[in-house]
Image: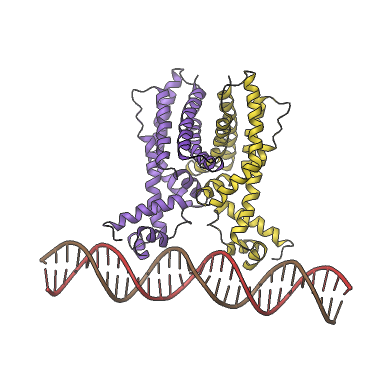
Chain colours: A purple, B yellow, C brown, D red
Amino acid sequence: MQKNNMEEQILLVAKELFMQNGYEGVSTTQVAKAVGCNQALVHYYYRTKQNLFKIICQQEIQKMLKILADIPQEDISFENFIEKIIEAQIGFLKNNPDAPFFIIGELRHNSEVLKMMKELFSEFGKEIVGKIRMFVEMKQSKGELNDVSVEDLLIDIASLDVMSFVGQVLFTQILEMDSQTQEAFLERRKTHIKKLILSSIKS
Amino acid sequence: MQKNNMEEQILLVAKELFMQNGYEGVSTTQVAKAVGCNQALVHYYYRTKQNLFKIICQQEIQKMLKILADIPQEDISFENFIEKIIEAQIGFLKNNPDAPFFIIGELRHNSEVLKMMKELFSEFGKEIVGKIRMFVEMKQSKGELNDVSVEDLLIDIASLDVMSFVGQVLFTQILEMDSQTQEAFLERRKTHIKKLILSSIKS
DNA sequence: AACCTATTTAATAACTCTATTAAATAACTC
DNA sequence: GAGTTATTTAATAGAGTTATTAAATAGGTT
């Protein structure tokens, strides 16, 4: 096929495959075939499968954490802020529907992924959580918010967002939903989650 | 090693391995080694790896659905009923902490698991959901409950329960929790989830 | 003991996988 | 255009995979 930038092509295609099938589920031969190049080329550019996987993981996990960091916090009500978090997360998941399956699936036995999560959280996550914590405490001191912990709040939001996508896959199969119904399902969930979270933190 | 019932031993050991490492992550050679028998014996009893996996999946998914069916509904308040659902689910997950990772991990690329979920849901799930729906509608007609949908309610509960365990794995690594802190984390989540869900359905 | 059946093993065919090597081709530099 | 470096390929070593086969062993019955 000889695309003009094989190095990047390989990364792109490998990302898709790894996200869909996990580390064990993809071979370098498969990657090469999907790219349309020789299998040795994958190793020429990335030396080992492990290394290729690591690079992709880092990129994707970083993207995921970044969406939280990119939410503006200035001049905004707390309700609005929470809504923005939920929207950003659902938006990301719509663009990356494989992400929850990938992370959760690999988390189990691929200690590489777990280590990476830890490192990247130290780098990006702590600051984000810190910011949100300050916001929450400020609102709590004003009595506009009950005494929910930031950890619980963030776990609640992430749980409901992520599992909407897992649920969607299940229901799509079980209830034979078409793509229009799937879209409607996710929109309904988004509205529902906002309402649920907001009602849970009102003081 | 010659345990007195190799057929069952193989199933037991294979279950552990598959749950931890997924279909692709386990070889029949590995199973045999862990059992302490010859690799051919695994195939003698279960013919193919696929078939062994299928049997294990069916058993485990069935167990998972059954915990919902086993919750008594008679002579019980709705609040109590919801609490029982959450307790049953968290209880199951404590005994099977690999289950969420397994299901979600395999759901992605192992269409076998998805098909099975569908079949087993048709067999067990529909009845359970139907029962809960009747309960909800009865309470709603009495005005003791807001107009939450049964689907949303069940997804909410399952999301929060399941992701508590995923979160636990993440936090254990990231925040270096010891096993006592992990246990406390789960107990705190259980209480929190009960409160959250109950507050969300009050009319 | 001889027979039969169930269980278990060793050996192996036929693949597939990762990683490396040497050789071929393309692309740039002087 | 010759020389040098970068890219790409074919070939293959070496290990591991699933599944099958025939042979060995164990257990029970008559």
Q: Quadrant of residue A81?
A: top left
Viewer-closest of B68 and A182: A182
Query: Residue A19 appears at what percent x and percent y?
Result: 43, 49
Compared across the picture, whether B139 is left or right of A144 comes to: right
- Image mark count: 0
Viewer-closest of D14 and B136: B136
Q: Residue at x 36, y 32 (%)?
A: A71
Compared across the picture, whether A16 is left or right of D2 comes to: right
Q: Is residue B162 visible?
A: yes
Query: Residue B166 appears at what percent x and percent y?
Result: 53, 42
Query: Residue A183 appears at what percent x and percent y?
Result: 45, 36
Q: Residue at x 58, y 24 (%)?
A: B201
Which quadrant does the C terminus of chain B fall into?
top right
Vertical order, A163 against B21 (above or below): above
Q: Residue at x 37, y 35 (%)?
A: A69
Viewer-closest of A107 and C17: C17
Q: Quadrant of residue A93?
A: top left
Which quadrant does the N terminus of chain B fall into?
bottom right
Compared across the picture, whether A8 is left or right of B104 comes to: left
Compared across the picture, whether B137 is left or right of B106 comes to: right
Vertical order, D7 against A162 (above or below): below
Q: Is residue A147 visible?
A: no
